[in-house]
Structures are given as C-alpha cells and as structure tokens.
Image (cartoon, helix red, strand yellow):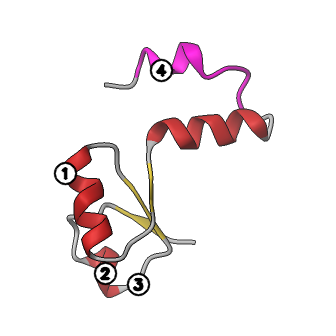
Amino acid sequence: MAIFIPNDPLAVEVQSDQVLIDECRGRLMANSLNLRHTGTLEVLVEAKSQGLIAEVKSLLRCVD
C-alpha cells in the first residue's frame, strides 16, 4: 500500500491506495480526487489495536 499526501500530484499519478491527511481541506481534496484517506488518530487507534503501541492518549498530546 502506498500512502501519499493528497496535495502532492504523485498520489493521483501513482494511484495510491490511501492518503494520510488530517486537515478538513485536505480530506475534501482527497474526496474530490477519489482517494481514500485516513488521519493520524485512525493510525494510532489501529496501532493500539494491533498491540504496536501501549496507549493512544499520551501520543495525542504530540499531535497538533
């Protein structure tokens, strides 16, 4: 799976499976380009569910 930032034309050019973006404007752009997207919180929750990290809460303090 390739993950790119949606305002980078490479995401569309290589037909990436998913883009990683948090801001609303970027998600809207990803939707308009028919790109699946996820945010930092979803990545952290998935990492916790797979046992890769112990908790999400302490890491959220680092997310702007």
Residue at which label 2 appears: 12
Which label lies toward us, 3 or 1?
1
- Kind of residue at disc 1: Arg
- 61 horizontally vs 32: left or right: right
Where is residue 54 drawn, in percent x and y? 73, 21
Instruction: Say few, some or many: other residues with alpha carbon within 10 Å of mark 4 (under 14 / 14 to 19 / 20 or more).
Output: few
On screen, 64 above or below 8? Answer: above
Report if residue 5 lies within the magenta region: no
User: How many numbered dots are placed on residues in this image?
Assistant: 4
Answer whether residue 18 is visible to the viewer in this image: yes
- Kind of residue at disc 2: Val
On screen, 61 above or below 64? Answer: above
Marks 1/2: CA–CA distance: 17 Å
Marked residue nearer the N-terminal end (4 or 2): 2
Marks 4/3: CA–CA distance: 30 Å
The part of the chain drawn in magenta is 53-62
Which label lies toward us, 4 or 1?
1
Main SS, magenta residues: loop
Residue at which label 4 appears: 60
Query: Mark 2 falls on what kind of element?
Result: helix
Marked residue nearer the N-terminal end (1 or 2): 2
Asked whether disc 4 touches disc 2, contact meaning CB atoms under 8 Å apart, the reply is no
- Kind of residue at disc 3: Gln
Residue at which label 3 appears: 15
Q: Which mark is residue 25?
A: 1
Residue at point 31%, 81% (across, down)? 12
Query: Residue 34 sits in which quadrant?
Result: bottom left
